[in-house]
Amino acid sequence: MKAQRLPDQPAITLSVNTTTAPTPSTRSQLASDEALLIANHFAQYLQPGIASTHQLKHEVYALRHQVYCEELHFEEEKPDQIETDEFDERSIHCCIRHLGTKNLAGTLRLITSNSPTEQLPIQQFCDYALTNDLLHPNRFLPREICEISRLAVPASFRKRQADQFEGGATGAINEASFSAQELRFFPYIAISLYMSAIAMTHKTRRFHVFVMMEPRLARSLSFVGIHFQSIGPVIDYHGKRAPYYIDSRQIKPNLSPGYRKLLTIIQNALFNTPS
């Protein structure tokens, strides 16, 4: 089978306003403090959801085409202007909607498996890089595993990072179109999509989570308490990426207070539970 050509995880980083190089603990504290401020007003501007209807899924695929094909040119543009593949039919599609414009501000999918014949992309395309036998997807039941994939945030909701990371946020926000308060939320769209995926792993009891991503993204996520474990070497897979694993049951206890509150808000929004 032909390997996918799209990079599933564009790099995102956490930016910290400081005049000196922060220590990991300082960076984590600053990120937590900012996240706490964001969480208190999150629902005023952004609405997490699951694309469970044909119409919503089409909107997700159109957004992916916009980001991957039209903006970043990772793939040729399609006549129907949607980007999809064989894994979408067994994926949970998380999305974030901007309430002011009603537009999708980002999407990410959680690929599932229900039988040994339904392999995750990481098994199908990168099995040779999975060198930790104890944390190989094959060690778990198919109904217990999933893979995070296809993170996409459109240019109008991305900030250009000061960090010169390849494949990062290459679009610029049209600041005249949004309030100053709203602009503070946009760097958190990607992390909020990860939070949505985490919430869905608990909802579906698929606690064993795999992802192919850049090591620097894994480091950035660790600052907020999401500690992915490397289970293989860095390989050339749509850029320099490595396979990672996390047990999602271990995430919430390790989250900084601000991000723990943000996860709770997202869970409440997704599952209509009281805040």
Image: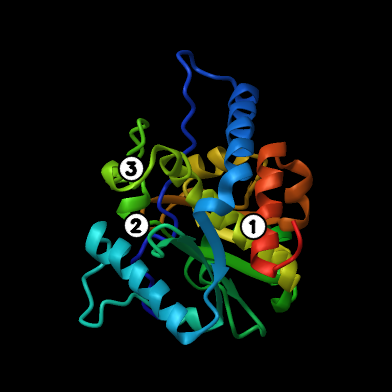
From the image, tell me which residue sits under label 3: 166
Quarter assignment of residue 33 = top right
Residue 14 badge: none
Vertical arrangement, residue 10 with respect to residue 217, above or below: below
Tell me the quarter of the image containing the N terminus.
bottom left
**For the residue marked with disc 2, what is the amino acid?**
Pro
Q: Is residue 186 left or right of residue 77?
A: right
Residue 154 badge: 2
- For image coordinates 43% across by 83% down, the residue present is 55
Residue 75 in view, yes or no: yes
From the viewer's perspective, is the residue at label 2 or at label 3 nearer?
A: 2
**For the residue marked with disc 3, what is the amino acid?**
Glu
Q: Please report whichever mark, 2 or 1, sits nearer to the chain's N-terminal start.
A: 2
> Can you give x and y, in whole percent of width and height, for residue 179 in the image?
38, 42
Q: Secondary structure at mark 1?
A: helix
- For image coordinates 70% across by 63% down, the residue present is 208
Of all residues, the one furthest to the top in this rendering is 20
Q: Please report whichever mark, 1 or 3, sits nearer to the chain's N-terminal start.
A: 3
Along the viewing direction, whichever of 273 and 258 lies nearer the viewer: 273
Say few, some or many: other residues with alpha carbon within 10 Å of mark 3 (under 14 / 14 to 19 / 20 or more): few
- For image coordinates 65% across by 48% down, the residue present is 262
Could you tell me how far apart the alpha carbons at marks 2 and 3 are, in whole angstroms? 17 Å
Vertical arrangement, residue 269 with respect to residue 185, above or below: below
- The mark total stands at 3
Residue 243 in view, yes or no: no
From the image, tell me which residue sits under label 1: 266
> Can you give x and y, in whole percent of width and height, for residue 154 in the image?
34, 57
Tell me the quarter of the image containing the C terminus.
bottom right
> Can you give x and y, in whole percent of width and height, for residue 265 in the image?
67, 54
